[in-house]
Structure formats: structure tokens, C-alpha cells
Image (cartoon, rainbow, N blue to C red):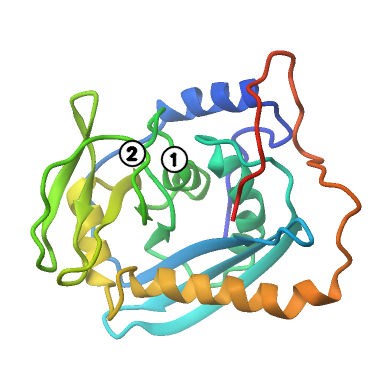
Amino acid sequence: MRIAQLHPWRVSTREALEIQRDLRGRLSLQPLRREPRVVAAADVAYSRRTHRMYAAVVVVRLPGMDLVETTTAVQIARFPYIPGLFSFRELPPLLGAFARLRAAPDAFLFDGQGLAHPRRLGLACHAGLLLARPTVGCAKSRLVGEHGEVSPQRGGRADLVLDGDVVGAVLRTRDRVAPVFVSPGHLTDVDSAVRLVLQVGGRYRLPEPLRLAHHATTELMRRMDPRLTPPRRLSYPNYRRAAGAAAWRDTSR
């Protein structure tokens, strides 16, 4: 599929922050124009042993959740783990998997944040602008914002509020299990994002397509990692440290 070239990837922390602020103004938050019939989910696993990123995109067809396609990509980590700049680390390997897609998904799910981000540009927002498709973030933990109580039944939700604005929803996807944190990325809004996550829910806390994508990344890493030689030292070829850039520490999974 076609991917827009909106900015360089070899950037410093300061430049990445500037890119986020610029891209934020390009987002379009709106109800989904039609109910998705083909949905893709993306995930990335990181190997501490070989310093590689294992990316997978799984495409399913609704309503039966029939598997349509799985694409993968492997890449040396090119950007350090810096809170708030997660998309600069995970999107480069995912772009390789997106480029191999033959299907044309109606919407994309990401294991991460969308609008619920300090600069309102999480992974799902950034990816949506590159893909020009509706995107939704579905995270297991809260990054920003405050919320009230969530009903213990499936479908229970509470607004996730940041600086007085609703940036997402805290959503119960299964009875009496921990909620997930849903936020719109691009070409969708909070209500549409919540409906999509419930629509593709299965027997587990995470939406089924995201669970399948996670299994695809871990299986790829399990097969490939033992055959690869670990680096002598960690390096980030696409990261350009700028004078005065914020310090970072590699604490990724």
C-alpha cells in the first residue's frame, strides 16, 4: 500500500518533537464514514539480545474475523526508547510490513496511544497520517489524562480527559477484566474508536486482531532471533543526538 513521505526519520529528539507538533495540525478527527469490513492490526516486538525490531501486520475480515493476510518486517532498532516519541522507534519497521500489504484495510488498530498523548500525536495518529487511513490506538496502560469509574461489564466506559479535552475512553472489553485505553488516531473519533474495538473483541482483554499481531511478532522473533548474531554494542543509525537533547535510557521490553 502507498505510504506518504511526510518527514525524515534520521532526526534528533528535538527534531522529532518539532515533527510531532507540525503533524498534530494535520489530524482530522471525525466519525468513521462507513463501518469497517477489513481491519488491520499492527504490533512490534523488540529483542534485547539482537537489538532488532520484529514487526507484524495482521488483516482480518469482519464479521467472522477471518484471516486475510499477515505481513512482517525485521529491522535493527534505529531510534532509542524515549517516552512520548514511541512512534519514531516502532513505525520504521512497521512501514516495511505495511508496504507488503496486498489488502486495503478500512481501518488500522495499534497497540499504543492515539490522541491520548502529551502532544496529541501518539503512534496511531502518526501512522494514520502516513497511511491516510482511519487509525485507532488501543493501549494496555494510561499515558496521560484522568478518568472516572468504569462499569465492570463489557462495554463500560469513561471519558479520558486531558487539559479539559476528551482524548479517548477507558473501555471494558470483557466483564470484570482490566480496561483498555482507546483513543482515536486519524480519520476517526472517540465514539467510532470505541465501537471498532468492541466490534473486533474476542475472548480476551485485547481486540482479537491485536492479539493475533502480537502472536505473529513473538513467533517471528522466536524463529529468527537465535540465528542472528548479537551486536557488540547498541547503536541507533537513524538517531541524531542534538546538543541539549533530553537524556534517554533504553528500557524497552
Residue position marked by numbered label 2 in the rendering: 116
Amino acid found under the numbered disc labelled 2: Ala
Q: Position of residue 229 (x, y in %)?
A: 89, 66
Amino acid found under the numbered disc labelled 1: Gly
Residue appearing at x 41%, y 77% in the figure: 60
Q: Which mark is residue 122?
A: 1
Q: How many marks?
A: 2
Q: Position of residue 193 (x, y in %)?
A: 25, 54
Q: Secondary structure at mark 2?
A: loop
Q: Position of residue 240 (x, y in %)?
A: 77, 28
Name the image quarter holding the C terminus.
bottom right
Mark 1–mark 2 Cα distance, whole angstroms, equals 7 Å
Residue appearing at x 29%, y 86% in the figure: 64
Looking at the picture, does residue 10 appear above or below residue 191? above
Q: Earlier in the sequence, mark 1 or mark 2?
A: 2
Q: Nearer the viewer, residue 55 or 133?
A: 55
Residue 197 occupies quadrant: bottom left
User: Label 2 near label 1: C-beta < 8 Å?
Assistant: yes
